[in-house]
Image (cartoon, rainbow, N blue to C red):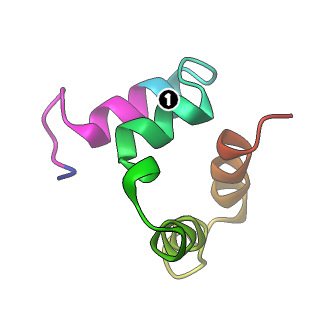
Amino acid sequence: MLTRSPNSLRARIERHVFRNPGNWSTEDLFEQLGAFEAGHARFGAFLEGLVCPDTIPDTAAQNRIVEAFIPY
Protein backbone atom coordinates (compact mmCIF):
# COMPACT_ATOMS: atom_id res chain seq x y z
CA MET A 1 0.00 0.00 0.00
CA LEU A 2 1.24 3.50 -0.79
CA THR A 3 1.10 5.43 2.50
CA ARG A 4 2.83 8.53 3.88
CA SER A 5 5.17 6.58 6.19
CA PRO A 6 8.87 7.36 5.53
CA ASN A 7 9.44 3.65 4.91
CA SER A 8 6.36 3.14 2.73
CA LEU A 9 6.72 2.03 -0.86
CA ARG A 10 5.61 5.48 -2.00
CA ALA A 11 8.26 7.21 0.12
CA ARG A 12 10.98 4.83 -1.05
CA ILE A 13 10.02 5.36 -4.71
CA GLU A 14 10.03 9.14 -4.26
CA ARG A 15 13.44 8.94 -2.54
CA HIS A 16 15.20 6.44 -4.80
CA VAL A 17 13.63 7.26 -8.19
CA PHE A 18 12.63 10.92 -8.20
CA ARG A 19 14.82 12.69 -5.63
CA ASN A 20 17.90 10.55 -6.34
CA PRO A 21 17.67 9.54 -10.01
CA GLY A 22 19.82 6.53 -10.77
CA ASN A 23 19.76 5.31 -7.17
CA TRP A 24 17.49 2.42 -8.18
CA SER A 25 17.75 0.73 -11.54
CA THR A 26 14.59 0.03 -13.48
CA GLU A 27 14.92 -3.57 -12.35
CA ASP A 28 15.12 -2.45 -8.70
CA LEU A 29 11.96 -0.37 -9.10
CA PHE A 30 10.04 -3.18 -10.78
CA GLU A 31 11.17 -5.59 -8.06
CA GLN A 32 9.89 -3.25 -5.36
CA LEU A 33 6.59 -2.91 -7.21
CA GLY A 34 6.17 -6.66 -7.56
CA ALA A 35 6.07 -6.28 -11.32
CA PHE A 36 7.94 -9.50 -12.01
CA GLU A 37 5.18 -11.50 -10.34
CA ALA A 38 2.38 -9.76 -12.29
CA GLY A 39 0.95 -11.14 -15.50
CA HIS A 40 1.86 -9.49 -18.81
CA ALA A 41 -1.52 -7.83 -19.31
CA ARG A 42 -1.66 -6.54 -15.75
CA PHE A 43 1.89 -5.19 -15.94
CA GLY A 44 1.18 -3.50 -19.29
CA ALA A 45 -1.94 -1.88 -17.87
CA PHE A 46 0.08 -0.68 -14.89
CA LEU A 47 2.72 0.96 -17.10
CA GLU A 48 0.08 2.54 -19.31
CA GLY A 49 -1.71 3.90 -16.25
CA LEU A 50 1.47 5.48 -14.93
CA VAL A 51 1.74 7.87 -17.84
CA CYS A 52 -1.92 8.29 -18.68
CA PRO A 53 -2.95 11.96 -18.88
CA ASP A 54 -5.83 11.18 -16.51
CA THR A 55 -3.29 10.03 -13.92
CA ILE A 56 -0.51 12.55 -14.60
CA PRO A 57 -1.63 15.51 -16.71
CA ASP A 58 1.83 17.13 -16.68
CA THR A 59 3.70 16.05 -19.83
CA ALA A 60 7.10 16.74 -18.29
CA ALA A 61 6.25 14.45 -15.36
CA GLN A 62 5.08 11.76 -17.81
CA ASN A 63 8.42 12.01 -19.62
CA ARG A 64 10.37 11.69 -16.35
CA ILE A 65 8.46 8.52 -15.50
CA VAL A 66 9.10 7.03 -18.94
CA GLU A 67 12.80 7.94 -18.67
CA ALA A 68 12.98 6.20 -15.30
CA PHE A 69 11.72 3.00 -16.92
CA ILE A 70 13.70 3.09 -20.12
CA PRO A 71 17.46 3.20 -19.59
CA TYR A 72 19.30 4.99 -22.38
Q: Position of residue 60 (x, y in %)?
A: 72, 56
Does residue 48 sit above or below 18 in this rendering? below
The residue at which mark 1 appears reads as 28
Q: Quick check: 55 left or right of 66?
A: left
Q: In the shown orientation, is residue 30 left or right of residue 57? A: left
Residue occupying image coordinates x 52% and y 73%:
49
Residue reaching furthest to the right:
72
Q: Position of residue 45 (x, y in %)?
A: 52, 76
* Left or right: residue 35 compared with residue 50: left
Q: Residue at x 18, y 27 (%)?
A: 7
Observer-nearest residue: 29 or 4?
29
Give coordinates of residue 71: x percent, y percent.
78, 35
Question: Residue 16, percent across and down?
Answer: 46, 24
Quarter where residue 26 is shown: top right
Q: Answer with left or right where residue 69 lies relative to residue 6.
A: right
* SS at badge 1: helix
Q: Which residues are magenta?
A: 3-15
Q: In which quadrant of the rendered view does residue 4 lie?
A: top left
Looking at the rendered image, the quarter that the C terminus falls into is top right
Give the residue drawn at x 50%, y 65%.
43
Is residue 4 covered in magenta?
Answer: yes
Identify which residue is drawn at 71% across, 65% down: 59
Three-letter residue code for mark 1: Asp
Residue 6 inside the magenta-drawn segment: yes
Image vertical order of residue 61 relative to residue 32, above or below: below
Q: Name the quadrant containing residue 58.
A: bottom right
